[in-house]
Image: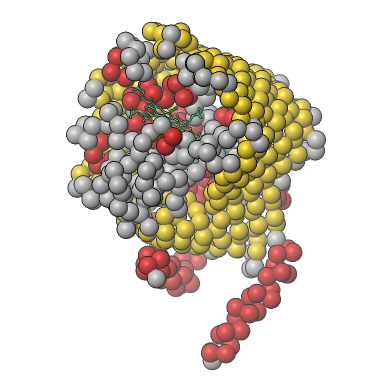
Amino acid sequence: MKMPCARLIPVCLLLALPGAALSAEISVDATSIVSFEQRAYTGAPKKDIVPATQFLGLDAAKLADGNLSLHVYGWGRGDILDKSYNNDQFAGSLTYGYLQYRFKAANADVRAGRFFVHEGIVNEQIDGASFRTDLPLGFGLSAFGGANVHTKKLYNENSDGKGSGNFGGRLNYRYKGVLELGASGQYETNAPALVNYPTVNHRLAGGDVWFSPHKSVELMGHTSYNTVTKGVAEHSYLMNVKPLQHLVLTGEYNDHRERNYFYSWASFSGAALSPAEKSHSLGGRASYGVSKAVEIAADYKHYTREIGNADRYGADIKLSFLNNSVRSGLGYHYLRAGKEFAIGGTPSASYHEMRGYIMHDSRIYFVAVDAIGYLFKEKVNSEKAAWEAMASLGYHITPDLALSGDFSYGRNPQFTEEVKGLARLTYNMTFDSKGGKK
Amino acid sequence: MKFFQQIFPALALAGLIMILAACAQMKTIPGLPASHPETLAAGQQVSCTECHEDNQKGTLKAYNAFNHSPAFVKNHRFYASSDERLCSTCHKSSFCNDCHTNQVEMKPSIKYGNRPDRDMPHRGNFMTMHKIEGKLDPASCYRCHGRANNERCITCHR
């Protein structure tokens, strides 16, 4: 092909775009929330804050040859009365904005723009490009590269602590529905020089496994290794056993080496994070769907840290009636934890947690009542409990458009008294009536 | 320039893959549909096996592994890290980013105050409770805060 011809290709593509856009399936999700919050701090005047927040998402599928799609989501907020956060009257963020091209075969796709990456041990958000594909013989490959997406600057620093570039990927192998092995890694570059913390790059390598010798047994997990500190950062493993169709028994084990896992966690190098520490947790959960209407679950977890250990156990029940249009749940948990974990000056960190809710969702309206209470074993700031009760009422103006309002009241050691209310307008349009309630 | 140096390896690999994708063998590897063909209602513990028989094909994992039992919802991270493309046949990225994202101000339990049945983190007054939970299991917080979503924290954590 001669050069001028090649140059014409993008021009032709551009000319084709409006036509393609017409045939595209476009969907918009918008949530507007105006909230009101009155907080009473002990010994300080009450503060009224009224932030108005707009969340907006746009998805355009079937662009160009039908395999290209565009996905954008973000939010913006303005304060009507007192400033609500960090002294900014206005704030906003582009959560993601990317073009995706999906190939028909092999689950192959290319993404370009701002998006999230979840590949094995890697969990990042970047401005850049990525691609993924399955390969013959059960192999698969993915790679991403680009610039880190920055967030709020750390206190007294000129950056958020993240480096400028970030790339990595994952190679995996799958054998039928029995085994998957993955190797993944990420490499951050140009970590900023911070005033109060060392300059550290976030670089990890690791492996993950999923093994299911029988469909009623699954073993999965991952281990990550920090290539800068040269040590294991995390082991995290889970086993599921499903002896009956609706019974799931799980056991999990997590192990963290603080220095390696939290190396680039600049903002919380607080007392509880000793770099020499290893911490682990061991837990189990059983959930059983007694019938379509009743689901029960019980869980237990033991936490071990250098400063002490703790146990948490409890149970939840979920009920559903009238063809799932009425849903309700009750839960109780107890945390047994010593003084080491307690809030400054309290002799114990133990508390009871209780929660109950009920909601009804019909074609015309929806209503919900929710209450949660934490009952401390020892008073915190001379308060015995932290609790909150919430009621929500909404009306479907059209199937896609709904208006709702929430009101909540609570008391707790932090604010003594907290009154919150909000009005919410949601617009959800799902294209082609397919793809689930995305 | 630096930026291009950084994305270059990915672009080069992407190019390589496109060439690979063109070859006939790749075309025979089955792919997932762009979106799940059946609309599922919100507010249920989706049970894949209610509609899908477990005749596992290709390298797809057994459907019952993805049944949204309370255990699956609590441990979804293990599935998301290797099957994100399956998740995205039903979930838009924003569904996930309601709970974990780079920068947001509103707790998900407030954004969805009308959905107490959802498994949102930090219900009630978490400002108080986090002082206990953060010491108990800081690693669990790092999955969402620390390198991201610190807007709120930096007013006190300095």
Q: Residue A382: which quarter of the image? A: top left
Residue at far bottom of view: A2
Quadrant containing the C terminus of chain A is top right
The answer to whether residue A268 is left or right of residue B50 is left
Q: Which residue is drawn at the image coordinates 56% and 56% (left, top)?
A: A97
Residue A50 image offset from top left, x and y in percent: 64, 32
Residue A296 image offset from top left, x and y in percent: 51, 18
Residue A312 image offset from top left, x and y in percent: 37, 17
Q: Which residue is drawn at the image coordinates 26% and 23% (left, top)?
A: A304
The number of numbered badges drawn on the structure is: 0
Picture colour scheme: secondary structure
The answer to whether residue B72 is left or right of residue A76 is left
* Most foreground residue, A217 or B21: B21
Q: Which residue is drawn at the image coordinates 60% and 63% (left, top)?
A: A67
Residue B42 image offset from top left, x and y in percent: 64, 34
User: In the rendered view, would you say A268 is above or below A39?
Assistant: below
Q: Which residue is drawn at the image coordinates 29% and 43% (left, top)?
A: A196
